[in-house]
Amino acid sequence: MGSVGIIGTGAYLPERVLTNADLEKMVDTSDEWIVSRTGIRERRIASEDQASSDLAVEAGRKALKAAGITADQLDVIIVSTVTPDMPFPATACLVQDRLGAGQAATFDLSAACTGFIYGVSTASQFIENGVYRYALVVGVDCLSKITDFTDRNTCVLFGDGAGAAVLGPVEEGSGFLSFELGGDGSGGDLLKQPAGGSRMPATVETVENRLHSIAMNGREVFKFAVRVLGSSAEEALKKAGLSKEDVDYLVPHQANVRIIDTAVKRLGLSQDKVVINLDRYGNMSSASVPVALDEAVRAGRIRKGDIVILVGFGGGMTWGATVLQW
Ligand code: ACO
């Protein structure tokens, strides 16, 4: 491996900010509880007329510009999301049309918060195998659209956003060095949107019972996350033939700062090597990792030659990590 990499990144965050103080007025919670239990201070919320494809197109445009290629050069577009504009057509098709990306192959991928890592893993295989030259991978979610804002257990955690990466050929030896993906479907009930699919189609009752909103067993998800975040990053490093001393930056899924801290301790990394932005955005599911990556790149923190680990976990349950030389 090592001749396919990320050649441009981009992000888009909706303008509206929802602070912990705002949530104090909506449910029985407090800024102190939210910050001490999660690290989150505010999150972004899409407007009524904004859907996932709108956010994805903005992030995609920025990533294309950073990569120095045009939309019509893309061979494949993968959109990772659990909040597509609608069940079909795929959000990737809507993004392709709006970007003017010719007739690039388009599909959505569902791996919840691990989706971006599943997405780059998938896209890089096409390029590595010589099938395609350029791919756009977008991680986007509008979790506010499926959040029950009367449920304090979940509504304080989530936000909306999109992050994107253009993948293409890079210098031999740099780019993706390893992938480590996993899943455990036996944990599917821990985090889900119960209704709206073929198991429980939408009815008046499913709407009244709020079954179209995120349902979560927070404590169990927490235990799972702490376990897999550290172990998948370790496994990806091992596969790349590297050790923790080689790591310049860790870009973890941004669900809870306590989950990240525990994983960072296990990996033996210093805090200055960890990219964290959940205080400003909360958990944006598929968008968390690519938005954090884009911010670190644009701020000049991640630079050419750096060894970077992207690592995530999410509903499914799923997990994944990749090691890159930037
Ligand atoms: N404000 C005040 N109190 C609250 C709130 C709130 N917003 N939410 C829950 N509480 C209460 C609970 O009701 C509970 O009260 P009880 O003891 O009387 O029942 C108490 O606080 C403590 O609850 P715990 O579950 O023990 O709190 P914990 O320290 O575990 O933190 C949290 C809860 C933040 C949800 C944590 O478990 C967590 O982060 N879990 C992981 C969640 C996650 O990452 N989900 C996303 C996965 S990614 C994806 O695929 C979308």
Image (tube, rainbow, N blue to C red):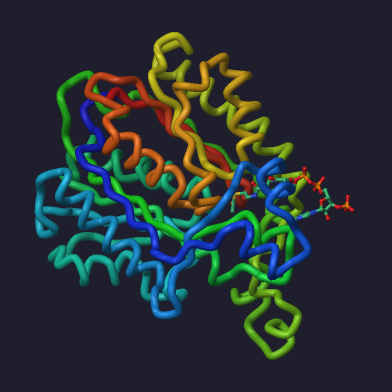
- Lateral position of residue 60 relative to residue 37, left or right: left
| Residue 245, image x, y percentages | 45, 9
> As displayed, is residue 153 above or below residue 225?
below
| Residue 21, image x, y percentages | 63, 60
- Lateral position of residue 89 relative to residue 305, left or right: right
> As displayed, is residue 148 above or below residue 300?
below
The image quarter in which residue 13 lies = bottom left
Residue at the spot x=48%, y=62% of the render? 17
Residue ranking furthest to the bottom: 204
The image quarter in which residue 294 lies = top left
Quadrant of the frame with the N terminus: top left
> As displayed, is residue 98 above or below residue 43?
below
- Lateral position of residue 242 relative to residue 132, left or right: right
Residue at the spot x=25%, y=33% of the render? 5
Residue at the spot x=17%, y=21% of the render? 172
In the foreground, 294 or 186: 294
Quadrant of the frame with the C terminus: top left
